[in-house]
Amino acid sequence: MNDERYMRVALTLAQKGCGYVNPNPMVGAVIVKDGRIIGQGWHEKYGQLHAERNALANCEQPPEGATMYVTLEPCCHFGKTPPCTDAILQSKIARVVIGSLDPNPLVSGKGISILQNGGVEVAAGVLEPECNKLNEIFFHFITTGKPFVLMKYAMTMDGKIATAAGKSKWITGELARNNVHKYRHRYAAIMVGVGTVLADDPMLTCRMENGKNPARIICDTNLRTPVASNVVATANLADTIIATSCTEGKKHKPYSDAGCEVLVVSRKNGQADLNHLMQALGKRNIDSVLLEGGGELNFSALRSGIVNRVHAYISPKIFGGSGAKTPVGGTGISEVSECFGLKTQRITWLDEDLLIESEVEYPCLQG
């Protein structure tokens, strides 16, 4: 079908905004007239024109009577830019084909109604699963107000994230590591625990060519992050947030002076409350978090129910060692029925390494 063909073009365009439009959705638009594409565009950067207006601005000829294909329902409210429905009606586009409906309460069906009331024919739901998948982060954020959390770890085939001596470079190969940096580019923030900072002194930046550095979040209940650590010393490279339950202002000052934000969150089970932290991050328009924590933080995140998806990179190596660290530590669970369920959605080979992508299901009710 031609509708699906042109919607696939719009999806490809939308992906060009990956990493640059958060917390907005990725959107692509294509304008077709007499069987030929006469205009196309995508949402290029947060705060700039939306895909529909970019496509109209790039038209080779007047769009009157044409069909517009857009991956997400056009907006109908004033934000950082004017409503796209106004631009579509003014252009005299005759038909609009939509992939996903916008769950944003400010839009949510209203965009379609405005177009239809203006005499525009509207068809919705074309390649809807693909369009929904493209913006799963946005859909989660706009409906919950909390970031979408992806927990990522690399382990050996015997489930170790480091040797018995604590060595972890490198478990996976270059292709797998490069894939991780694509997600650092896409996600708004990366989060680790203070234990990772103390053990590895990471930079937590994106090393993909032309990539965007995510905001860096350090979960540090008792404020033990060294002021001389890389994340603090390079706070000028990316927003750096130290999430702590320490309320002593004097201890905050060295981090603030270095350019970090010290974010005080409540304490739960002796640790910084991760649900409180997610609420605070959502208020800062951080729509997504790549969790690259150690076993303790990973278990706390799962127990708190904040993890939406898991990416497990598995390398064809065996480390052994009863004391060698595993991806998820903590106290663990007592009963099989209490487990964190995973629904595998995709398995990918990255040279010799395997990537398993799974959705977390709360709770697991296996018999």
Image: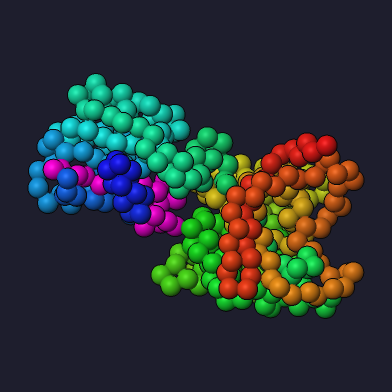
Q: Quadrant of residue 62?
A: top left
**Residue 144 forms part of the magenta stretch:** no
Q: Position of residue 308 (x, y in %)?
A: 63, 46
Scheme of colours in the image? rainbow
Query: Is the N terminus in the top left, top right, bottom left or bottom right quadrant?
Result: top left
**Residue 29 forms part of the magenta stretch:** yes
Q: Residue at x 88, y 69 (%)?
A: 323
Is 364 displayed left or right of 188 in the figure?
A: right
Is 331 displayed left or right of 9 in the figure?
A: right
Q: Looking at the picture, does residue 96 appear above or below residue 347? A: above
Pick the residue in front: 330 or 318: 318
| Image mark count | 0
Furthest toward the top, the residue is 117
Q: Looking at the picture, does residue 109 appear above or below residue 262? A: above
Q: Is residue 263 visible?
A: no
Q: Position of residue 351 (x, y in %)?
A: 58, 73
Q: Is residue 310 visible?
A: yes
Q: Residue at x 33, y 36 (%)?
A: 98
Q: Residue at x 69, y 78 (%)?
A: 169
Is 35 displayed left or right of 309 in the figure?
A: left
Furthest toward the front, the residue is 1
Pick the residue in front: 102 or 66: 66
Q: Looking at the picture, does residue 125 appear above or below residue 359? A: above
Q: Residue at x 23, y 48 (%)?
A: 55
Query: Is the C terminus in the top left, top right, bottom left or bottom right quadrant?
Result: top right
- Magenta span: 14-34
Is 150 displayed left or right of 107 in the figure?
A: right
Q: Position of residue 345 (x, y in %)?
A: 60, 50
